[in-house]
Image (cartoon, grey):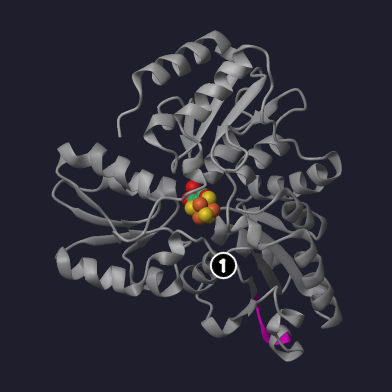
Amino acid sequence: SPSDPDLVERARAAKEKLGDKVFVLGHHYQRDEVIQFADVTGDSFKLARDAAAKPEAEYIVFCGVHFMAESADILTGDDQKVVLPDLAAGCSMADMATAEQVAECWDVLTEAGIAEQVVPVSYMNSSADIKAFTGKHGGTICTSSNAERALNWAFEQGEKVLFLPDQHLGRNTAVRDMGMSLDDCVLYNPHKPNGGLTVEELRAAKMILWRGHCSVHGRFSLDSVNDVRERIPGVNVLVHPECRHEVVAAADYVGSTEYIINTLEAAPAGSKWAIGTELNLVRRLANRFADQDKEIVFLDKTVCFCSTMNRIDLPHLVWTLESLAEGNLVNQIQVDKETESFAKLALERMLALP
Ligand code: 13P
Ligand code: SF4
């Protein structure tokens, strides 16, 4: 839907008034009405890397979700303030691993006598607490664009990996990209005693996958892939690695949001694509490439937007920018010092991956 011209003008004016004091980051899943005001757009990795790119900016307005804003706070200077335009923009996947549950899991691994062999690898889509746990126990963060490199690094440090919180990214990377078997992976259920696993199962596993998933990507199914192939002969199926294993196994291409964009940019005219990721991005790409004769469709019409990404809308952005322009610091995301120091260790290990 076209943005309200009055709100567009107010956002523009407030941003102009702030000038170099503000740096706006936008994740690819953000609405068009918001993304038009981003100074930098990117996938989770690019936004983490670029968060500190403008140290003179007093305010970093993060158009994305809570864990991304936390990561930006961790990676930027104390004098830079990170702001999330709607504090209710969380991530249901990140919420699936709490600090208490992960501490309990570590106790289970310790009791089984394997904790010393385990290296935690946590997906960016996790709270600062989980990142701090990861840093404390010698592990690294990863995103969907470097999960294989992160796992290779982790298996140089230890024999087993505890992968948090997205079971699908963990399984897909291990099996599709690294040649492990499904039997090398076990699923740790935080709602069951001992994760629902026996000591023997834990000792035999190479990958201990946390039972978390993305509520959006989890809805694409093997039927979605089969149906679109039937409907559009010759279609290329391109999905995000947060999709379920059978979807990823049936797809032609798999990668992060940035990879999806780059792949479509490089695609020849006349090619057809079905994309399995968040709808704002798919729509934007379909419009962008329509005049280049690239047909781009959503992998499954019954799947919807990420509701928390969508909480950041133009009214919230206008309110945020106008408040900051008037000198009112609103919706600051601030990670406490102790958590920050360990979480930073884990994030810096990711940024240093070869
Ligand atoms: P990427 O942008 O890293 O592909 O992540 C997708 C996602 O789900 C972010 O929440
Ligand atoms: Fe979280 Fe999925 Fe939304 Fe990304 S798309 S923010 S993983 S719920």
Query: Would you place residue 234 above or below residue 262 in this image?
Result: below
Query: Would you place residue 302 above or below residue 50 in this image?
Result: below
Pointer 1 local density, CA inside 10 Å: few below 14, some 14–19, many at least 20: many
Query: Would you place residue 327 above or below residue 348 in this image?
Result: above
CB of residue at label 1: within 8 Å of ligand 2? Answer: no
Secondary structure at badge 1 equals helix
Q: Is residue 337 left or right of residue 282?
A: right
**Residue 13 colored magenta?**
no
Q: Is residue 218 left or right of residue 301?
A: right
* Residue 38 drawn at (x, y percent): 47, 27
Nearest to the observer: residue 96 or residue 49: 96
- Identify which residue is drawn at 30% across, 61% down: 300
Q: Is residue 154 left or right of residue 3?
A: right
Camera sees residue 21: no
Per the rendered image, the range of residues in magenta is: 203-207
The N terminus sits in image quarter = top left
Query: Would you place residue 56 above or below residue 87 in this image?
Result: above
**Residue 204 colored magenta?**
yes
- Identify which residue is drawn at 29% across, 47% down: 264
- Identify which residue is drawn at 70% across, 45% down: 348
**Residue 301, quarter of picture:** bottom left
Q: Is residue 169 left or right of residue 197?
A: left
Nearest to the observer: residue 137 or residue 198: 198
- Identify which residue is drawn at 60% across, 47% down: 90
| Residue type, numbered disc 1 | Gly
**Residue 9, quarter of picture:** top left
Q: Which residue is mark 1?
A: 170
* Residue 189 drawn at (x, y percent): 66, 76
* Residue 8 drawn at (x, y percent): 40, 20
